[in-house]
Amino acid sequence: MVETMPTLIPRVIGHRGAAGHAPENTLVSLEKAAALGVRWVEFDTKLSADGVPVVFHDDKLERTTDGRGPVAEMPLAELLALDAGTWFGDGFAGEPVPTLGQAMATLARLGLGANVEIKASPGREAKTGDAVGEVLKSDWPETLPAPLISSFDAETLAAAGAAAAEIPRAFLVFKIPRDWRARLEDLGAAALHCQAKHLTRKKARAVLDGGFQLRVFTVNDRAEAEKLFGWGVDAVISDYPDRLLSL
């Protein structure tokens, strides 16, 4: 059962583990983030063909594995046999696609908190939100702070919230829409996550003054992070968190 006490999220979060240093969304990427001194990471989840949550970003396999076709059409046993490391570098050859359960076990061993983003495959929005929410609610390690669930898709985030109402949620956008407040309130989300290049000081102030948390992706430049923190942004998500940890 997930603890209900408020979660204190640090100012720098590793993106897909530490995606600038290791293949994204793999256990070795989580390991690298911890080795760099990161205390929280972000990673993506979606469902295998047989409905098991795995840590993966794209709808298709080609970019980050030696597999082909949609993730949603491949059963778990076949997903786990793929090489998700060689594309990044030969030194990562054979690194597998992890399940959400394996990722949580690794987080517990490393003492890492996590922002679990849900990237549902097309047509599986509610099913994926429900499945990930249920796994986090029932199996999240008791030794860790409560996780944060996020998604770009409102249906997915609503389903996750229905499955695990006690876990805080963040709504993801690239550019902050005019109706951002209504969307957050409808979803019961406590935070907005947006893309750095579209954010202005005025928009940041509006979100923060509205009583919501504001986190920004993907920030790899130290000067940009300093500017965002100057605007009051709560946290940045980075491929190279080691560049920003001393801020």
Image (tube, rainbow, N blue to C red):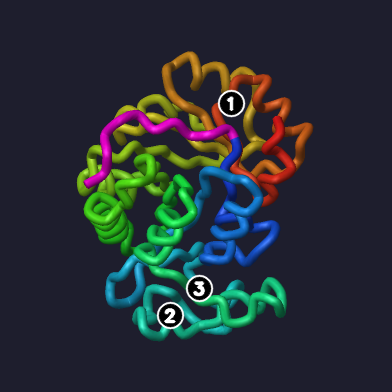
Q: In what quadrant of the picture does the C terminus appear?
A: top right
Q: Is residue 8 magenta?
A: yes
Q: What amino acid type should be assigned to the residue bearing mark 1?
A: Val
Question: Circle 1 is placed at which residue position?
Answer: 233
Q: Residue at x 34, y 65 (%)?
A: 53
Which stretch appears magenta?
Answer: 1-11
Asked if marks 3 and 1 touch (Cβ < 8 Å), the reply is: no
Q: Gap in Å between the C-alphas at discs 2 and 1?
A: 37 Å
Residue 169 position in % (x across, y down): 36, 38
| Precedes in sequence: disc 2 or disc 3 | 3
Q: Residue 240 in the image: state x and y as whole percent.
A: 69, 49
The residue closer to the viewer here, 67 or 27, is: 27
Q: Residue at x 43, y 23 (%)?
A: 212
Q: Which mark is residue 60?
A: 3
Secondary structure type for disc 3? loop
Q: Are marks 2 and 1 in contact (CB under 8 Å)?
A: no
Residue position for label 2: 79
- In three-dimensional space, the C-alpha distance between marks 2 and 3, rounded to whole angstroms, equals 12 Å
Q: Say which quarter of the image contains residue 86.
A: bottom right
Res. 122 in view: no
Query: Between marks 3 and 1, how big is the CA–CA gap?
Result: 33 Å
Quarter of the view holding residue 145: top left
Question: Sequence-wise, which precedes: disc 2 or disc 1?
Answer: 2
